[in-house]
Image: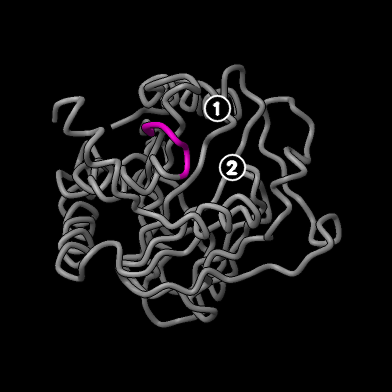
Amino acid sequence: MTTKAFADRKLLKALTCEQVQSYRDDGYLILRNVFNIEKVKSLGDEVDRIARDYSELIDPMNMRVRFKLQVETGQPVFEVLDPIADLSPIANEVTQDEHLSDILYDIYGEPACLFKEKLIYKPAGALGATLHQDWIGWPGFPESFLTVLVAIDCFTDESGATEVYPGIHKQGYLSPKDGQHHCLTHEMLGVEPVPLILEPGDVAIFGCFTPHLSAANMSKSSRRGYFISYNALSDGGNQYQKHYREFHEWIRFKSPAEVRDQLFFR
């Protein structure tokens, strides 16, 4: 697309002024029916195919995958592919979707750059995520970092929908800036969380300083979501490859010395 064509397209706003202000005030935004059901079904079918046909990837030593404990058995179950766009042409298309790009332009006031992306399966019985902020005190980690959550399945209270704490993002980062992942407590925040209740094709957007968590998936099926993160163009430009290099170095550093040589990325 030419520069003029992009500029002409941006004369038409994807978000209203009220929606942009709501995101700035609350630190999150829910948008309905951003992706049609056919697209979402294709994405869901493809990620299931990848998990089935690339079963050799589902290895605890593969830095692409992560596991969660199962509520009833206490055993680890496969939960995350991070990243997945290099395995899935459909996922890659979603990260570059034109309408989504326009939405992010309205939030940033400039183009967005893909920072990272992951598919969270959250199978039935899988534990949830602890309360945290996504920003990490690594050198150069973009403060414009935000995440677009594309619902493949329904996000409900029963299935462990992501819950956000509105307005707290204005306080910035609440943990030591030591480059480590930190958990927060509900008592620190002073507000009640809001569950992101979503239907397939809906999108939720939340910033890197917005505290969030999720409960266990107590439904009888997976709660698949595609979590795509971006940064503003002026905040470091394209950092996708850089992020994954740093992320894998961090995983190795955090892993016990006896398994570091066994780690791989495939």
- Label 1, secondary structure: give it: loop
The residue drawn where x is 37% and y is 22% is 238
Vertical arrangement, residue 220 with respect to residue 57, above or below:
below
Q: Which residue lies under the disc numbered 1?
A: 142
**Does the magenta segment cover residue 54?**
no
Residue kind at label 2, given as amino acid type? Cys
> Dot 2, crowdedness within 10 Å: few (<14), some or many (≥20)?
many
Which circle's residue, 1 or 2, is located before the other in the chain?
Answer: 1
Based on the displayed image, in which of its 4 quarters is residue 95 positioned? top left
Q: Which residue lies under the disc numbered 2?
A: 208
Position in image of residue 122 (x %, y %): 43, 64
Image check: 119 left or right of 141? left
Vertical arrangement, residue 143 with respect to residue 185, above or below:
above
Position in image of residue 208 (x %, y %): 59, 42
Image check: 64 left or right of 94? right
Between the residue at mark 1 and the residue at mark 2, the CA separation in whole angstroms equals 9 Å
- Label 2, secondary structure: give it: loop
Residue kind at label 1, given as amino acid type? Pro
The residue drawn where x is 25% and y is 62% is 35
Q: Quadrant of the C terminus?
A: top left
Quick one: 121 or 213, which is closer to the camera?
213
Image check: 222 left or right of 23? left
Vertical arrangement, residue 62 with respect to residue 38, above or below:
above
Quick one: 199 or 9, which is closer to the camera?
9
- CB-based contact (under 8 Å), mark 1 and mark 2: yes
Query: What's the magenta region?
Result: 107-112
